[in-house]
Amino acid sequence: MDSSSTDLLSSLLPLVALFAIFYFLIIRPQQKQAKAHKEMVTNLKKGDKIVTNGGLIVEVSNVTEDSLTVKNSDGSEMKLVKEFVSKLLED
């Protein structure tokens, strides 16, 4: 190898290392978290208590393909798009 290709390799090595660190510290955990959230939303069923992105704690009363009907603490029902489920409350 000549010196110009060695210089190119040594200058690209830190960038490759930086990308690898970025991938393992940021991208990969985010993908795992998104997969776990999608699985949690898919497995919701009637009677589950959830927290919405708006901070409401509600109970699931009906599940459809793209939305949920949820019951508030005062008994009122509302429709919620599945993407706005923040987390499942464990009893």
Image (cartoon, rainbow, N blue to C red):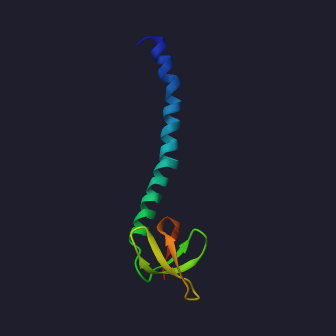
* 72 displayed left or right of 69: right
Q: Position of residue 82 (x, y in %)?
A: 47, 68
At horizontal 49% and vertical 19% (from top left) the residue drawn is 8
Q: Position of residue 55 (x, y in %)?
A: 61, 73
At horizontal 44% and vertical 56% (from top left) the residue drawn is 32
Q: Where, by quadrant of the figure, is residue 54 drawn?
A: bottom right
Task: Reply above or below: 33 against 77.
Answer: above
Task: Reply above or below: 50 against 3.
Answer: below
Q: Quadrant of the N terminus?
A: top left
**Which residue is the extreme one toward the bottom?**
74
* 42 displayed left or right of 22: left
**How many numbered circles are shown?**
0
At horizontal 50% and vertical 35% (from top left) the residue drawn is 17
**Which residue is the extreme one toward the top?**
2
**Which residue is the extreme one toward the right?**
55
Q: Foreground: 30 or 4?
A: 30
At horizontal 56% and vertical 83% (from top left) the residue drawn is 72
* 72 displayed left or right of 3: right
Q: Foreground: 24 or 51?
A: 51
Task: Reply above or below: 45 against 20.
Answer: below
Q: Position of residue 14 (x, y in %)?
A: 53, 31
Q: Position of residue 3 (x, y in %)?
A: 48, 12
